[in-house]
Amino acid sequence: MAPSSRQNNSHAVVLSELPASFQLDEAVRALQSLPLSQDWERLTRRALERLNRHGDCAKYLDCVNDIPQTSSTQVESWGPLPQVSANFSPAEQERLHEALFRLKPWRKGPFSLNGIEIDSEWQCQKKWERVTRFATPLEGKKLLDVGTGNGYYLYRAHEERVEFALGLEPSVLFCFQFLALQKLVRCQNVGLLCLNSDEFTPLCQSFDTVLSMGVLYHRRSPLDHLLELKGFLRSGGEVIVETLVVPGPVGHCLLPEGRYAQMRNVWFLPTVATLVSWFRRLGFLSIEVDDVVATTSDEQRASCWSIEASLKDFLSPNDPSRTVEGHPAPARVLIKARVP
């Protein structure tokens, strides 16, 4: 089918062509038993329409369809470097490499897919180690990951024996990366919807744990985002937020007039004390803050699988404690809290 005809057809055409993993995820099916079930058709339709409207939908779909499929696929490890093996012929292995490479940039990872090492920009195993050390154990939990990217944290949550893990991700490319991974991994208790968190049913109050990793500073209204996260949690549920912070007292917050570390869409960077005050003002309980961690090139850097410029290019060459714009260099904190 020509790319133009794919892009002009209804969402149902894309649904019929998407891999079964997108349609049949146990995590997605499990959502139908939650209070948002009455909106399920509307949510899935909106997610599929976003995929279909994107100008590169056909190109990305071809990449996923080019990945060989075999019953011999095995997950060797869910650990820091999720590893998958399969009995592919040399020609199939070449197809796999080309299809995965055409889906770059890979921002989250790493992954090892039948010997193909996807060296992502972010070494997310470092952040996940901090999360699991800080968070309440995830075993048996219903987890929502807002801004999940390609789902790396969903697979790590699977390793922690969650009941199911759902990701929300508006980036069409990252959603197709997830589809590519699922075609190989076939993990039955993770799922992804191509939606922003503000498109998801508000106040569904169904999840035990909600993650928001690297999202808050991209929101023009950070308090509204925290209220969204609060509304997703069942009574007593836990939210874990990872965000950029700057030094300073309570009440202080950096609002860059232009870019921050070359990012256009950065809004509010609070101090830790200000961040805690936001959580208190919104009625969160049991607020705890982990150590502030400076972002280094060990965790974020360019690679042939990601992008040409990364953290080291965004810092001042004369003073790496500042960004190229003169702001404090990126430092991140984890904060967790409960709802009543």
Image (spheres, helix red, strand yellow):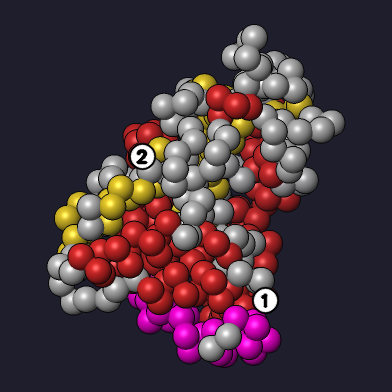
Can you give x and y, in whole percent of width and height, for residue 52 in the image? 62, 78
Residue 260 visible in the snapshot = yes
Q: Nearer the viewer, residue 331 or 307?
A: 307
Residue corresponding to mark 1: 53
Residue 15 lies in the magenta stretch = yes
Q: Amino acid at mark 1?
A: Arg
Q: Identify the residue shown where x is 68% and y is 62%.
A: 198
**Which mark, by number, is residue 125?**
2
Q: Which mark is residue 155?
A: none
Camera-side residue of 54 and 289: 54
Q: Position of residue 95 (x, y in %)?
A: 33, 67
Rendered view: 41 above or below 134: below
Horizontal side of residue 94 vs 274, given as left or right: left
Q: Quadrant of residue 284?
A: top right
Disc 2 vs disc 1: Cβ atoms closer than 8 Å?
no
Identify the element where label 2 is drawn: helix
Q: Is residue 160 above or below residue 293?
A: below
Residue 14 forms part of the magenta stretch: yes
Q: Nearer the viewer, mark 2 or mark 1?
A: 1
Q: What residue range appears in magenta?
A: 3-32
Most common secondary structure along the magenta stretch:
helix
| Position of residue 256 measured from the top left corner of the image (x, y, whole percent) | 79, 30
Say which residue appears at 65% left-offset and 56% top-offset: 228
Mark 1 lies on a secondary structure that is helix
The quadrant holding residue 259 is top right
Report whether residue 255 is seen.
Answer: no
